[in-house]
Image (cartoon, rainbow, N blue to C red):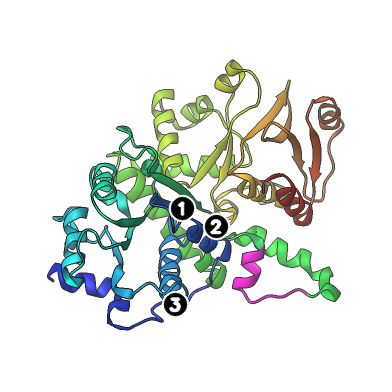
Amino acid sequence: MELRTLLFRYNPWWEGEINFIKAYERKKLLSEMGKQFSNKNIIFITGLRRVGKTTLMKLFIKKLILEKGIKPDLIFYVSLDDFILDKYSISDIIEEFRKIHRHSVDKKIYVFLDEITYKREFHRQLKNLYDRENIKIYASSSSASILKDSSAFLTGRESIMEILPFFFEEYLELKGITINKRDAFIFEEYFEDYLVTGGLPEYILTKDNSYINSLIDDILYKDIVLKNNIRDKDIIKDFFLLLMNHSSGVLSLYKISKVLKLSTETASRYFGFFLNTYIIGSVKRCGKLNQRLNSPPKIYSADIGIRYIFSEGKKLGKQFENYFYLNFKKEKLCYVKEDSIEIDFLINNRYLVEVKYKEGLSPEQRKLFEKYEAEEKHIITNPDELNKLKDYCCK
């Protein structure tokens, strides 16, 4: 297939097909993309595989055409993981787009580059486009390597959007569920369904465990084993299961190395690979520098549905803590520990929070919670309290 034919297939709106996508609209995320539309910054869209990055980009393209009145021939989308594009640079591909529609380099165009990390030195290539052409670029990746611009080519030229799995309110909307005030008593039932289902859109609709298994296989074997030339793929699966079984809890690299019979250096390197795929996140201990560096992190899953399927501990309290983490992930987080007693989170060095779904604090936790100096203190036991705190402290 020639390049021009491929590009037409990726861009059906060039030939008048406007309703090329029908999907749930994540309004907050689309609004955030819109706020970045008028500046020249390159917008990097990151996040876990299959969380909806491609769908979001295409929905935004549709909004540009139907609501902002951007001419379809000024908008270009392509997925750079397509093997046909292997021999072309990003500049080659965009030049072909300009040729198709006879757009000069001075003509403003809007470009959406899916899976940008499939192109070598993409930071340098994007910088050249940014500097030389009248262009607005949105680029996506399921790897945190998009953030690692070691040569600082894009310093001052980029903004980052991390896409997270659906939150509970979006889950209800996707499933077409409306809870009236007179039926508030069933709210808890739906929320607990969500705690075990998670926020991956296709899994919400199908509850097909093979879909999650396929996703995890792609992450473990394509994004970690193959990309990093790891010979023992089984050790990566064991590593993943260990992470899931300790999610919403503390896990040291020393313990990982002992359980899996790895050196601490190898365990640390592999842990970085998992972070790089967004399948896990981590929260460091609060305190002085030596405490932060020498204490193990708390581990959280990128999606609570994945955590529920792959962890042996099915307690809803742990699921709820993981959900709390995802809601506040973009804030500055650390956990408090004195002796062997922990408090879940200190947010932005101001809000001390213990997350307890249908539980209370132990006497030891209560003592530490009351003693610890913080601007405000909150015990979060349900999603309403979580949302109120989020609206209050993290606008």
Element type where label 2 sits in the image: loop
Amino acid type of the residue tagged 3 in the rendering: Leu
Closer to the camera in the image, 144 or 49: 144
Q: Which residues are magenta?
A: 169-179
Q: Do the residues under discs 1 and 2 have CB atoms within 8 angstroms?
A: yes
> Taking 235 as reference, is 247 left or right?
right
Tell me the crowding category of disc 3: few under 14, some 14 to 19, or many 20 or more residues within 10 angstroms, Cα based.
some
Q: How far is mark 1 from mark 3, CA to CA?
A: 29 Å
* Position of the N terminus by quadrant: bottom left
Q: Up-down: is 364 above or below 184? A: above
Element type where label 3 sits in the image: helix
Tell me the crowding category of disc 1: few under 14, some 14 to 19, or many 20 or more residues within 10 angstroms, Cα based.
many
**Residue 201: image x %, image y %?**
52, 66
> Taking 26 as reference, is 93 left or right?
left
Q: Residue at x 79, y 25 (%)?
A: 373
Q: How far is mark 1 from mark 2, CA to CA?
A: 8 Å
Q: Do the residues under discs 1 and 3 have CB atoms within 8 angstroms?
A: no
Amino acid type of the residue tagged 1 in the rendering: Leu
Amino acid type of the residue tagged 2 in the rendering: Pro
**Residue 125: image x %, image y %?**
24, 46
Q: Which label belongs to residue 165?
A: 2
Which badge, 1 or 3, comes first in the chain's sequence?
Answer: 1
Q: Label 3 belongs to which residue?
A: 66
Q: Up-down: is 194 above or below 275? A: below
Q: Label 1 belongs to which residue?
A: 48
Point out the frontmost of discs 2 and 3: 3
Which badge, 2 or 3, comes first in the chain's sequence?
Answer: 3
